């Protein structure tokens, strides 16, 4: 190093000792600040201790997967915001050593951790539900034992506020990691009966019975989730149906459609309208929101 370079380095150390420390350089003699190595990205991160409802981890209902470990308690708690007029699927999976016996379960509660969840529908863990596509089971076709647990979740409409918290308790009889995710499985589309007949084909792509609601909201929407019109459907395994509405049969005549599944996992939804006077079809494309698919 040249003389000029050494002079520049000394000047930096004198003028900016904190910069030298941040780069791992030893503190100048007489400094009261101890030198330390740069902190890693996880420095100071706390290990989750979500063993009560009061310390529950937040679960985002968009399909995001979290990893947790039951080594800090038999029960692990999570909390999620459930919107009215929507349906959700909760999956909890222990894929490492749970093939021969289902060693994990889940339940839905209010904030006190003891009162059963007050939503319209909150069913967890029937073997038939766990084994519906995409199946969580790897032991038998009947789903009598396997690798995880699934819950169907749906809250009431006509409630204020329109969002309600669900506290999820996961109980495991093994020591190790598990994955948990909550995804919305509501379908959204447009509808019109303003001179058009309106059709909603719905197909069940699973080997189990699926039940749900079709809810119709006018352009003004609804602050408490109450639809302007609603109807139910139930589909046996691999069955299909078509909801049909003639022109003028729904008021308001135009708006948005939501298709919810509260018993089962998923359905396939289409949406179209036909005006016989002008022989014109309108095809709408149903979409899903807050659903990252089946990736873990």
Image (spheres, rainbow, N blue to C red):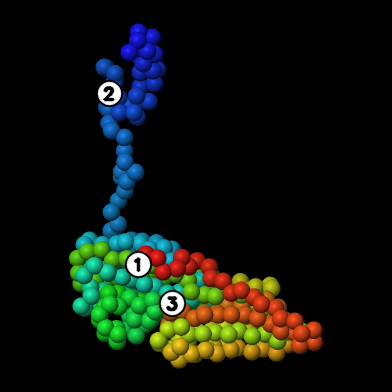
Give the residue number, with chain letter if any, for mark 2. 26
x and y percent of residue 89 in the render?
Answer: 42, 74
The secondary element bearing badge 3 is classed as strand
Q: Quadrant of the N terminus?
A: top left
Q: Is residue 53 visible?
A: no
**184, above or below 139, in the image:** above
Compared across the picture, whether 76 is left or right of 213 comes to left
Give whichever of discs 1 and 2 has the lower sequence position. Answer: 2
Q: Secondary structure at mark 1?
A: strand
* Residue 288 appears anywhere in the view: yes
State the image quarter where residue 206 is shown.
bottom left
Q: In the image, is residue 5 above or below residue 289?
A: above
Residue 113 on image: x %, y % = 33, 71
To which residue does mark 3 refer? 153
Measure how far apart labels 1 and 3 are at the Cα level.
15 Å
The image quadrant of residue 71 is bottom left
Q: For residue 228, which numbered disc appears in the image?
A: none
Give the residue number, with chain letter if any, for mark 1.
Answer: 180
């Amino acid at each position: 190093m040249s003389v000029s370079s050494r002079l520049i380095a000394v000047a930096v150390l004198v003028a900016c000792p904190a910069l030298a420390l941040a780069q791992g350089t030893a503190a100048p003699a007489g400094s009261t600040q101890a030198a330390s190595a740069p902190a890693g990205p996880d420095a100071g991160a706390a290990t989750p201790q979500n063993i009560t409802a009061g310390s529950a981890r937040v679960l985002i209902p968009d399909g995001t997967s979290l990893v947790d470990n039951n080594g800090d308690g038999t029960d692990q708690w999570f909390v999620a915001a459930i919107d009215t007029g929507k349906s959700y699927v909760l999956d909890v999976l222990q894929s490492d050593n749970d093939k021969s016996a289902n060693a994990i379960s889940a339940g839905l509660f209010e904030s006190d951790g003891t009162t059963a969840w007050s939503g319209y529908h909150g069913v967890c863990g029937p073997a038939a539900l766990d084994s519906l596509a995409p199946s969580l089971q790897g032991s038998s076709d009947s789903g009598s034992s396997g690798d995880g647990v699934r819950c169907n979740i749906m809250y009431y409409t006509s409630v204020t506020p329109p969002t309600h918290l669900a506290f999820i308790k996961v109980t495991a009889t093994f020591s190790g990691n598990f994955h948990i995710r909550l995804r919305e499985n509501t379908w959204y589309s447009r509808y019109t009966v303003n001179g058009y007949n309106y059709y909603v084909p719905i197909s069940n792509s699973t080997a189990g019975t699926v039940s749900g609601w079709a809810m119709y909201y006018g352009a003004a929407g609804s602050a408490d989730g109450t639809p302007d019109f609603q109807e139910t459907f139930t589909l046996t395994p691999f069955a299909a149906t078509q909801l049909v509405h003639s022109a003028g049969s729904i008021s308001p005549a135009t708006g948005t459609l939501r298709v919810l599944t509260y018993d089962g996992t998923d359905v396939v939804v289409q949406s179209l309208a036909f005006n016989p006077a002008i022989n014109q079809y309108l095809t709408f494309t149903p979409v899903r929101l807050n659903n990252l698919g089946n990736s873990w």
